[in-house]
Amino acid sequence: MDPIAKNIEKQVIVRFFQPDMQVLKATAKHLAGSMPDAKLGLYGQAGEVLVVITAHAYAPAAATELTESAAEQFEQAAGATAYGRGKGSLAYVTAGAMIESEAVVAAADEATGALLDVEFSATKRGTKVFDFGADSYANAKMAAKIDAAATFDPDEEETPLQSAADLASAAAKCTRADFGVAITGLEDGGDVYAAVAHKGTVHISKIPAGQFAGKQAALSILDIIRRLLGKEDLPNSKSFRAGNEVDWNAPQKTKAANQNLVPIIILIVLLLALCGACWYLASLFFFGKDNGDAIPASTSTSMTQSMPASASTGGTVPENPVSASVPAADSTASTAPSAPAQGTTTAVNSGGVVHPFA
């Protein structure tokens, strides 16, 4: 009798941008040993990486369990570099976050706008967050304002790095968009800079020159916006004050000082709360004890009042004194009581880079 074949197939695509490849490979090696019924494929281009997980099982539920478990392990290992699953591109995910935050982005020039156009045109969400130049670089008056505002030092020729920072800042300021973006260096043959200006700070990523440098720069902009809206760290970029001179090699101010200050403040608050609790218990013990011993509950007082015989106001005063016994009130003590289409694996074209897991 032939054994029952595992003919139920389930596939999940997990998407990453600029992940640690060593982490992904280590996770894949672990899963290959613990999940023999799950096959893994890796496809990468322009900083974007797709992990395709294909599972075979006897039943749909078992196949789904395999793919979900593998996907979750990849996502946990890669952290914030994992941005979604399935067909949703980085532009789709970023646009969704922008719609939720009611944010828009403006490009500083035509070259930057053309690169973002390619990404945002692939999703219907793009038109809700990107003007495709209508209110920025494609508008002659606005383009002139951006160029004028982007000049950092008229007497010196700006570097691509400084130009990216100034153009992004000018785009945000002049258009009043939530995010102003610029990409420079593509025509120089050297490093390419992708800048995102947001709330007085410019965040810049440096991309090595290459065939896909323009696409990676556009994706870097989308990833920076996604992370800023999600209040996540930006490990692949540097941040500078808008309007200032930019030095890529200057030391970056980190959040370490503030992060160390928070636990110190919490510790001080806890110590103060502990001291207050000790004082309260001590006062309750000592003062409560004194109040309880002051007047025993069974004690009563007797008062004798004598009236002299000569004190009369028209009435007869008895010869014998009058004795009155007045019971005292009992004392009381109080106590206080607290990508590829679903189901298929599509290889990247010849321009891409394919790294299958060994």
Image: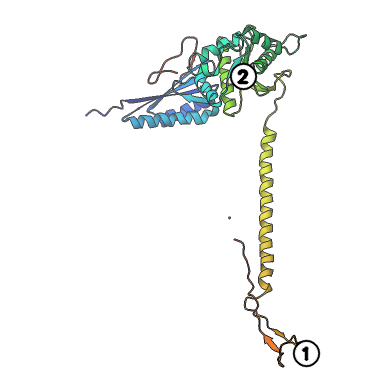
Tell me the quarter of the image containing the C terminus.
top left
User: Residue visible at 66% across and 60% down?
Assistant: 281
Q: Callout 1, which amino acid?
A: Ser
Frontmost of labels 2 and 1 is: 1
**Where does residue 280 sit, x and y in percent of width and height?**
67, 58
Precedes in sequence: disc 2 or disc 1: 2
Image quadrant where one finds the N terminus = top left
Q: CA distance from mark 2 to mark 1?
A: 103 Å
Residue 21 vs 157, above or below: the answer is: below
**Mark 1 lies on residue:** 310
Task: Between residue 153 and residue 102, name the one nearer to us.
Answer: 102
Helix, strand or loop status at disc 2:
loop
Residue at image point 69% right, 54% down: 275
Q: Secondary structure at mark 1?
A: loop
Figure check: 248 above or below 337: above
Of 173 and 152, nearer the camera is 173
**Residue drawn at 63 percent across, 17 percent down:** 180
Residue 86 placement: quadrant: top left
Q: Nearer the viewer, residue 15 or 269?
A: 269
The residue carrying mark 2 is: 177
Q: In the rendering, at what x and y percent does residue 68 appear?
A: 42, 30
Indicate left or right for 29 with 316 as reference: left
Mark 2: amino acid: Ala
Q: Residue 116 in the image: x percent, y percent?
A: 55, 13
- Please state the horizontal and vertical placement of residue 58, each as a whole percent of the image: 31, 30
Name the disc covering residue 257, or none: none
What colour-coding does the image apply?
A: rainbow
Q: Is residue 25 left or right of residue 291?
A: left
